[in-house]
């Protein structure tokens, strides 16, 4: 296992979902592109990839600002995005270097998911990849006041698990998520390092 954790040095593990437990970037980008196409707009992969850690509102705010786009009707837009995403769950694959950790520690310490995503999509993603039974606690941006990079989702996950934040280890794949974990007072692994090492072998 790539991540070697020492028993007794932590009380819980918390995982981001998209990009950490699962490779869902393609499915998310496809669904956003489909929704934008109804407005005659496009989103390039390169632009999206550097911002995939943002929550939905922050991502659209950045898109509208960068491309001087008239403000989109968010509720209708998100509904279309979610419809397309849920119809393309087959595009999602688990990231084994991380899911191996969750499976190894399942039943030994509490495991949680803390995501900037929409709850319905996070739940569907975990079910589609057969990861849902590993996690009793799931916190999404809709459960807290502020999404990542604010620490809210991680602090809420610790609260629900009844674990002190400093005794939590987080697994993340974005700068926003890592900032959120650190602001919550938690230790964090940047799983991009593991993916880079693995791909270079």
Image (tube, rainbow, N blue to C red):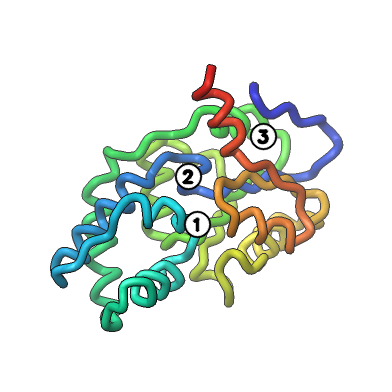
Q: Residue at x 64, y 27 (%)?
A: 104
Image quarter hosting the C terminus: top right
Q: Which mark is residue 53?
A: 1
Q: Quadrant of residue 5?
A: top right
Q: Is residue 56 above or below residue 145?
A: above
Residues at marks 2 and 1 touching, judged by CB atoms closer than 8 Å:
yes
Question: Which of marks 3 and 2 precedes in the sequence?
Answer: 2
Q: Under tag 1, what secondary structure?
A: loop
In front of the other: label 1 or label 3? Answer: 1
Q: Residue at x 30, y 69 (%)?
A: 78
From the top left corner, tell me how far across and down residue 100 is, in percent. Answer: 57, 27
Front residue of this view, candidates 126 and 47? 47
Q: For marks 2 and 1, give the CA distance.
A: 9 Å
Residue under circle 3?
Answer: 107
Front residue of this view, candidates 54 and 103? 54
Q: For marks 1 and 3, give the CA distance.
A: 29 Å
Q: For marks 2 and 3, give the CA distance.
A: 24 Å
Residue under circle 2?
Answer: 19
From the top left corner, tell me how far across and down residue 46 is, in percent. Answer: 36, 51
Q: Under tag 3, what secondary structure?
A: loop
Q: Is residue 148 above or below residue 29?
A: below
Q: Which mark is residue 144?
A: none
Q: Residue at x 41, y 67 (%)?
A: 59
């Amino acid at each position: 296992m790539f991540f070697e954790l020492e028993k007794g040095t932590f009380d819980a593990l918390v995982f981001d979902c998209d990009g950490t437990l699962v490779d869902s970037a393609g499915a998310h980008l496809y669904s956003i592109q489909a929704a934008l196409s109804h407005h005659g707009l496009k989103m390039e992969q390169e632009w999206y990839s550097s911002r995939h850690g943002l929550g939905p509102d922050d991502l659209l705010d950045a898109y509208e600002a960068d491309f001087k786009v008239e403000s989109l009707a968010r509720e209708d837009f998100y509904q279309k995005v979610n419809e397309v995403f849920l119809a393309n769950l087959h595009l999602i694959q688990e990231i084994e270097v991380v899911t191996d950790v969750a499976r190894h520690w399942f039943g030994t310490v509490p495991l949680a998911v803390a995501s900037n995503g929409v709850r319905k999509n996070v739940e569907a993603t975990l079910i589609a990849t057969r990861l849902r039974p590993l996690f009793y606690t799931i916190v999404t941006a809709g459960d807290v006041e502020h999404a990542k990079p604010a620490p809210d989702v991680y602090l809420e996950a610790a609260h629900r698990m009844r674990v002190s934040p400093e005794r939590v280890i987080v697994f993340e794949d974005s700068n926003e998520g890592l900032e959120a974990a650190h602001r919550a007072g938690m230790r964090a692994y940047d799983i991009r390092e593991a993916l880079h090492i693995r791909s270079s072998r």
